Amino acid sequence: MARTVQVKRGALGETRIVEATDAPLGDGAVRLKIESFSVTANNVTYAVAGDAFGYWNFFPGEDGWGVVPMWGHAVVTESRHPEIAVGERVYGYLPMGDSLDVLPTGVSAGGFTDAAAHRQPMSPIYNQYSRLAADPEHDPAREGERMIFGPLFKTGFLIESFMRRENWFGAEAVVMTSASSKTAMGLASVARHRSPGIKRTGLTSAGNVEFVRRGGFYDQVLAYEDLASLPQLSSVLVDFAGNAGLIHGVHTALGDHLKYSCTVGATHVGAGFGQDNGPLPGPTPVLFFAPDHAVAANKELGPKAFGEAVGESWMRFIAEAGGALTIDVRSGLQAAQEAYLATLAGKADPAVGIVIRP
């Protein structure tokens, strides 16, 4: 019996736990028992942008309901694939639930891709699974950190790489909204080491200012109410909040100093994501879609060099971020349901990383 937490696509605060009988495995298929996954603001972004970017299509629901994707670990409990053994563990994109059937293709020592037909229209990045026995990023002692920070950190890494290739659009500074988010911290960490000449300013809610300052990733941390204090330097804006009013405020505060603006996520649910707040001063915001940049980076550098560059920055970041986060391990899908709803409502503590063992 497989169980999932389903979310009503038209009302993201409505959830339910659904049970379904396991279907027989087809030829070449593998059944995964989900061991653990994290719940972060990234998952809220998947829900908010689910229709626009196809996130609901990975693990389909029915009658207007959907399953929010998670990043986590699973173990093979049944296999009809000759190269995948029962008992081996994998890391990748999983439903908010306790099991998943996949159809491995392109199997190598390091991983495989799920060839399920309904997943093929989406970015291939989300369909790849790492086999932990030969995964250079796997550290048994850091599984919690990988689930919480890993996908978000890679997005931050890709943003910095893109900005550096563009010479930061001639800017001296980067302004990041939702500075307590894992992706923003990842970007700030990578920029500090790979683009040390760029000043890093983090914007966050008043209640999170001290937490963000303690992390040490930013040169300056300001509350959203203090936009008037933004340094008048040539800047790029990287928005992780999806708050149209906030974007408008930053554009207005920086005026002609703003050289480029991009939006990445949506952590401020119900605060104007995708809405028109009237004429926007300065450059038109451009969507940064990490999977496309990951595919491009892999082609440009080659998988090995790209993996090594990410790995080096990841090890540095996790050493820096280790003391900034407490990992809270919770059991059961009801706990996952509660963690998702708290994160959706903006009530999750940024100093706590939630890991669910369903």
Image: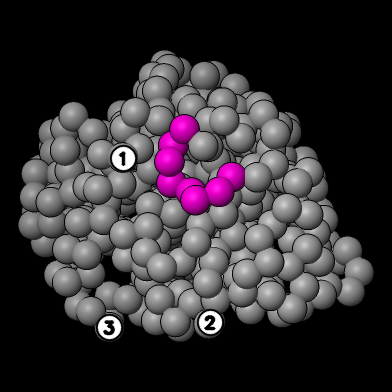
Q: Secondary structure at mark 3?
A: helix
Q: Is tag 3's residue or tag 2's residue first in the polypeptide sequence?
A: 2
Q: Which region shows up in magenta?
A: 214-221
Horizontally, residue 253 falls left or right of residue 328, namely: right
> Nearer the viewer's eye, disc 1 or disc 3?
1
Q: Is tag 1's residue or tag 2's residue first in the polypeptide sequence?
A: 2
Which of the labelled discs sits on residue 300, or is there none?
3
Q: Is tag 1's residue or tag 3's residue first in the polypeptide sequence?
A: 3
Determine which residue is flagged by label 2.
169
Identify the image quadrant of residue 17: top right
Which amino acid, mark 3?
Glu
Residue located at (54% from left, 66% from top): 173
Horizontally, residue 297 falls left or right of residue 282, namely: left
Q: Secondary structure at mark 2?
A: helix
Determine which residue is flagged by label 1.
320
Q: How would you rate the neighbour count of disc 1 (Cα within 10 Å): few for under 14, some for 14-19, many for 20 or more?
A: some
The quadrant of the image that shows the N terminus is top left
Q: How would you rate the neighbour count of disc 3 (Cα within 10 Å): few for under 14, some for 14-19, many for 20 or more?
A: few
Identify the image quadrant of residue 110: bottom left
Horizontally, residue 113 falls left or right of residue 187, namely: left
